Image (cartoon, coloured by chain):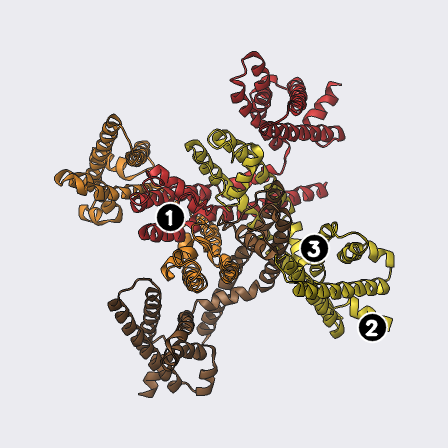
Chain colours: A orange, B red, C yellow, D brown
Amino acid sequence: MAVSLKETVEQSDTRLGRLFDFSIQALIVLSLVTFSIETLPHLSSSYKNILSALELFCVVVFTLEYIARLWVADSKIAFALSFFGVIDLIAILPFYLSLGVDLRSLRIFRFLRLFRILKLVRYNQAVRRFHRALLIAREEIVLFAVVALILLYLAAVGIYYFENEAQPEAFASVFHSLWWATATLTTVGYGDVYPVTVGGRCFTFLVLLVGLGIVSVPAGLVASALSKAREIEDGKELFETDTKDCR
Amino acid sequence: MAVSLKETVEQSDTRLGRLFDFSIQALIVLSLVTFSIETLPHLSSSYKNILSALELFCVVVFTLEYIARLWVADSKIAFALSFFGVIDLIAILPFYLSLGVDLRSLRIFRFLRLFRILKLVRYNQAVRRFHRALLIAREEIVLFAVVALILLYLAAVGIYYFENEAQPEAFASVFHSLWWATATLTTVGYGDVYPVTVGGRCFTFLVLLVGLGIVSVPAGLVASALSKAREIEDGKELFETDTKDCR
Amino acid sequence: MAVSLKETVEQSDTRLGRLFDFSIQALIVLSLVTFSIETLPHLSSSYKNILSALELFCVVVFTLEYIARLWVADSKIAFALSFFGVIDLIAILPFYLSLGVDLRSLRIFRFLRLFRILKLVRYNQAVRRFHRALLIAREEIVLFAVVALILLYLAAVGIYYFENEAQPEAFASVFHSLWWATATLTTVGYGDVYPVTVGGRCFTFLVLLVGLGIVSVPAGLVASALSKAREIEDGKELFETDTKDCR
Amino acid sequence: MAVSLKETVEQSDTRLGRLFDFSIQALIVLSLVTFSIETLPHLSSSYKNILSALELFCVVVFTLEYIARLWVADSKIAFALSFFGVIDLIAILPFYLSLGVDLRSLRIFRFLRLFRILKLVRYNQAVRRFHRALLIAREEIVLFAVVALILLYLAAVGIYYFENEAQPEAFASVFHSLWWATATLTTVGYGDVYPVTVGGRCFTFLVLLVGLGIVSVPAGLVASALSKAREIEDGKELFETDTKDCR
């Protein structure tokens, strides 16, 4: 019996294992939806009761899942200290902790429930390919992140000197200007702060000319690294198929 | 006669077939333009009469086309149940249904006329290449769609905790925050909602740093998959040319 | 003398030819700057006189250039009817036409002076590579332009149904909605029109999810086609070098 | 002793050299943070004193570093005139110059301190790969920069003719329109200026259709050039390994 439980919980290539995985994933999404609806203002108390019941149900199932995983693990300590072992615990702990303390501090612990979303990562095999792609383009991404940060800082200092006098509120300091630089170089452009002086606008023009190339390059790097990662995986599969054929 | 009608309607490599295809496509565009102009407020009644006449003309031709396609089809039931058979029917049905009912519910059926635009897809051979490209990069696109959705959700929850107290209207719930997250991570940045607290702005900075790479990668994936799809097609054509040469 | 004039005007690999090309290009930029400054409001009459003098100087030189090109051309009619022959004429004609007519219609002819900027294209050899890249990716770019236009239209119609009642001014018709769709799908997001209803925001979310991939793919296509065009050119140069070596 | 100092200062593959490099980089970041905090309005005098002390400390260390580098350089004049020799001097000079002049002009010299950030570039080996990538795609980047500038100008002139009458303030001249063109074609879209006439909106639609492809292509070019640069580097390393193996 313990063997079939182990197979159900840990493997995903049997029918029961797939059903178990799918059920847990559906519950994670349900608990996130519950959490989101709870934040809506002006909820009637009847709705709140339904949400609390759903919340209780999710926590009970997640607790049973954690106990089951701990039970079937070859090394109980290794699982408890593994990345997903810790996440599984953090995902249920806030609920039990909030039972022992007063209601005020409850709000802080609700934030921790967010880690449940990382459980989705546990079941997604395709994430490994993305991880591999990040490793391939690691150096370039770090380089561009550094260059982009330097550019952001230079843009913020530059606009501070041009706009500080004309708009002492919006561009009060280099930190305020950094907010403008972020919204501008990512091309979000909320429109809450923007240059109004001729100098500031010419500076923005120059910064955008240089900056767009810098900021949007990493996406291209990840895309090309991802296609390389797929080629490597395809190569491995071919190799494994060849090896099987040789037997 | 039935044979030449069949050729005209179903094939596009004869002169009559091309003329038929082009006429239908022109009529689809005309009916869409008519539909758009009808939505303009303060239209004079003389304009409305012209638009109604054009509308009637389009529906009559589309009805004749549907009957012709049904007539020449090898299996009438197979065509009626096929994707484009259903679309062709949906494109004309609302008009006839609106004759039998009162004017109030007319508005709802007008919406269905939109499906006519999908008829353009029917005649566009190049769509197949795009379809092939989507199949090549299917896994990566699904992975990035999932990662992007998780990121959107995390960004929404994060900004909710930072901005809810400062802007209880704009960031009233996680759902309101999702609207902000959508507008920000796609870099649209309408400027109707934006963070004002220091914490919210720092959080936005971090989310954009990570998020831009995630959200704009799929476009690169599609572009590279499309060039692969072209290579595959070119290879096939070469193969076919070779085979022809061998005869 | 006619031979050396021909070399100076038509070729750019001699010292005099390069000097001639550079002078003309500098004058084009000067005439564009002049034109831009003229549009500034509240210009003093002394500045206006200087600008008129510069304008006169440019037109005289461009006229002399046109006469010289016509003079040295092997076939005068062929040059006069060629793309750049027509542009050169259009660039100077408005000035002479405005001498014969009253001042009111002058404004319209000033618009034609813009074609002068296309003269810059005449001297830029690298434009040919871009032209070649566009030819390589022609089919894909047309496909994506069509798909993007269909998506724009569907987005406009969809948002019209969601937002028309809530914002009868901003989303007054499908044409008004097209302006929103343009600003949103290109991620410009001015913030002059944006959805406020829950349905409209969810629809925007879905449209952006699909649309961003479609709209930003062509740039990737052009980039990859451009690298292919460079490979083809490098191949040609190698071939030509090989051929020269063989002599 | 001079030898070990030389090794510490100039090389980064010994333990002392790495420690020295890391300390200087940390100090650069510290001095930039100090500079940024100083721009905050309403700072208490006690904070200002701490910042001044940190500033003094940084300048002293940078001065000692400059003297050390000058001391150990093989050719003192070559170092003093080298790019980083000049930057190192400019980074510390403003502080000493501000001691001799009155306080008003101090503000201008503070701007020069920004060059210190370029010291970070000195220690970053990965910058060379980026430099190589820029050299590979140089021609294409220049071409697209020129085409993008022409497009920006044409967009500015076009929108000036469409919007000048409707919005004489926002689109007062071609230069004002250039600000709109910059914010629009980079898709930043602050929303401070946007077209309101039908003609202006249709023109914007057309400009964006053409412009997005032009403006976002260079990023793709840099990304592909960077992967080429990595391939070239990998090839070199392989070659060097091979050469070593042959010994």
Q: Can you see residue C151?
A: no
Same chain for mark 1 and mark 3? The answer is: no
Q: Which of marks 2 and 3 is in front?
A: 3
Q: Which of B53 and C103 is in front in this view?
A: C103
Distance in Å between CA atoms under marks 1 and 2: 68 Å
Instruction: Check disc 3: other Cα within 10 Å, few if <14, some if 14-19, many if 20+.
Output: some
Image position, residue B125 (x, y; %): 63, 36
The residue wearing badge 2 is: C4
Numbered disc 1: secondary structure: helix
Please tell me in which quadrant of the rendered image residue A171 appears: bottom left
Q: Which of marks 2 and 3 is nearer the N terminus?
A: 2
The residue wearing badge 3 is: C114
Give the vertical position of B223 relative to A2 (above or below): below
The residue wearing badge 1 is: A128
Specify the subunit that label 2 lies on.
C
- C118 horizontally vs C78: left or right: left
Look at the numbered discs 1 and 3 and tell me whether their residues touch, using CB distance below 8 Å.
no
Q: What residue type is labelled 3?
A: Leu
Numbered disc 3: secondary structure: helix
Q: Which residue is drawn at 65% across and 51% down?
A: C134
Most extreme residue toward the left is A100
| Rendered image: mark on residue D40 | none
Please tell me in which quadrant of the rendered image residue D205 appears: top right
Q: Nearer the viewer, residue C110 or B4?
A: C110
Q: Which amino acid does label 2 sit on?
A: Ser
Q: Which of C165 and A139 is in front in this view?
A: C165
Distance in Å between CA atoms under marks 2 and 3: 31 Å
Q: Quadrant of the N terminus of chain D?
A: bottom left
